[in-house]
């Protein structure tokens, strides 16, 4: 007879497989709708767009960020760029002041208040039809904005469009692993777009109709994840969010495990607490797939990662303890010592499901790359990613849960 632990294990395993199969089915149903455009795009009209660049100690990257905006293939008189120095203590202020000669750039300096306050200062000076932000460590492809704006032209019901976020110039092994992760993220966000269930409007060049903020209000602190909270707020108010897969934005990512841990801890903590803030949305059909699929799927992922990792650590500890006792009594036996089943369940079914999930992850990474530039180059990074993250992700997930229980907000950096 199966134990309660085994029942929980198989339920979580089933739900994990179900989520991945759901994404796969969504892809198969909508694959013909995914296009990658290589030709130049022309719009019937070019709406005005304000892009805010919040800056805090970004002296190494902000100049390249602004240059990428100035090189956008979009009428220069239709783009207004607001550079907002959020109390930087390095040379960021000096660097952005050099762009004051451009007629479509305005520069603001303020005391440090966090990214959301910088974005809200930009909203106070909003006079255009559309609004977006760009993190000061990210760089836009020259065709990204016009491709995003073409989505609005094709669908008047859209209220926000997110780009494909990719890793810029990965060098360390941890950045190369993130490159695979971000490619998978493109695929998943595109599928969530088809489902009308996107839960994050990322800071790098998500473009909104200005009426979103006029009707719903400005950004909120939102546990240092204001880009997630605004998407939650839009979903609650039935505002449609889409993803433009061939609009690429490149971002600098953490270079070390420690920096990655701090970033992901903030993201997961933000998800948990934004979900708690919007708990009245969960499982309510009137909020669509966002409440009946995206939120539950993310919650399942957090619970499953925590449970599987905890069970593995417990089983490993129990195994090592028993072998220590055995060694003290009978001496070292290589054959018996190596006989370790990490979950004490039917290993054949576990291995089969693990291989299936691994293949689905690889497929997601490949498709994420394909739907951004219609190219694919084989890399070992896609194989490193699920292995490395299997050990790293549960750590920041459980720490985020711990911080939530104790109401400890993680640092931004």
Image (spheres, rainbow, N blue to C red):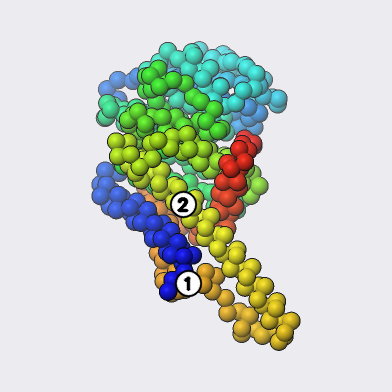
Q: Position of residue 346 (x, y in %)?
A: 45, 74
Q: Is residue 131 above or below residue 204?
A: above
In screen coordinates, is 410 left or right of 229? right
Image position, residue 187 (x, y; %): 39, 47
Residue 37 horizontal/vertical position (percent): 33, 39
How far is mark 2 from mark 1, CA to CA? 20 Å
| Displayed quadrant of residue 389 | bottom right
- Quarter of the figure that contains the N terminus: bottom left
Q: Which residue is mark 1?
A: 345
The label on residue 301 is 2
Q: Are marks 2 and 1 in contact (CB under 8 Å)?
A: no
User: Badge 1, how many Cα within 10 Å: few under 14, some, many 20+?
Assistant: some
Q: Secondary structure at mark 1?
A: loop
Q: Is residue 87 visible?
A: yes
Residue drawn where x is 53% and y is 55% of the image: 306
On the rendered structure, is 375 left or right of 92?
left
In the foreground, 109 or 348: 348
Q: Is residue 289 above or below residue 8?
A: above
Q: Is residue 192 visible?
A: no
Q: Which residue occupies 58% across, 79% down?
A: 339
Give the quarter of the image for residue 366: bottom left
265, 384: nearer the viewer? 265
Instruction: Looking at the image, tell me whether mark 2 or mark 1 is earlier in sequence order.
Output: 2
């Amino acid at each position: 007879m199966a134990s309660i632990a085994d029942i929980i294990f198989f339920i979580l395993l089933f739900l994990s497989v179900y989520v991945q199969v759901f994404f796969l089915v969504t892809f198969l149903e909508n694959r013909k709708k995914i296009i990658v455009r290589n030709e130049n795009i022309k719009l019937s009209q070019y709406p005005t767009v304000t892009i805010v660049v919040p800056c805090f100690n970004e002296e190494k990257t902000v100049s390249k960020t602004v240059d990428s905006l100035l090189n956008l293939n979009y009428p220069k008189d239709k783009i207004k760029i607001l550079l907002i120095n959020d109390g930087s203590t390095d040379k960021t202020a000096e660097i952005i002041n050099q762009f004051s000669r451009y007629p479509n750039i305005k520069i603001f300096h303020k005391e440090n208040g966090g990214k959301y306050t910088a974005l809200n200062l930009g909203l106070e000076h909003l006079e255009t039809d559309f609004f977006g932000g760009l993190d000061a460590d990210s760089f836009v492809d020259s065709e990204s904005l016009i491709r995003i704006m073409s989505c609005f032209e094709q669908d008047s019901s859209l209220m926000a469009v997110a780009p494909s976020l990719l890793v810029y110039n990965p060098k360390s092994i941890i950045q190369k692993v993130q490159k695979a992760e971000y490619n998978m993220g493109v695929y998943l966000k595109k599928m969530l777009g088809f489902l009308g269930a996107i839960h994050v409007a990322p800071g790098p060049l998500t473009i909104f109709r200005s009426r979103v903020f006029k009707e719903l209000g400005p950004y909120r602190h939102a546990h240092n994840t204001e880009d997630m909270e605004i998407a939650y707020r839009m979903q609650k108010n039935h505002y449609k969010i889409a993803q433009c897969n061939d609009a690429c934005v490149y971002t600098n990512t953490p270079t070390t495990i420690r920096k990655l841990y701090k970033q992901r801890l903030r993201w997961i903590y933000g998800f948990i607490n934004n979900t708690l803030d919007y708990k009245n949305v969960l499982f309510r059909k009137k909020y669509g797939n966002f409440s009946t699929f995206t939120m539950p799927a993310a919650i399942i992922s957090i619970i499953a990662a925590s449970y599987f990792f905890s069970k593995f650590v417990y089983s490993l500890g129990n195994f090592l303890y028993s072998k220590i006792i055995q060694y003290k009594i009978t001496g070292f036996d290589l054959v018996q010592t190596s006989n370790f089943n990490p979950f004490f369940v039917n290993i054949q079914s576990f291995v089969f499901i693990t291989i299936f999930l691994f293949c689905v992850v690889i497929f997601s990474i490949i498709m994420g790359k394909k739907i951004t530039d219609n190219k694919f180059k084989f890399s070992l990074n896609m194989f490193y990613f699920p292995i490395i993250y299997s050990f790293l992700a549960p750590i920041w997930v459980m720490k985020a849960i711990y911080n939530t229980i104790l109401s400890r907000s993680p640092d931004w950096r």
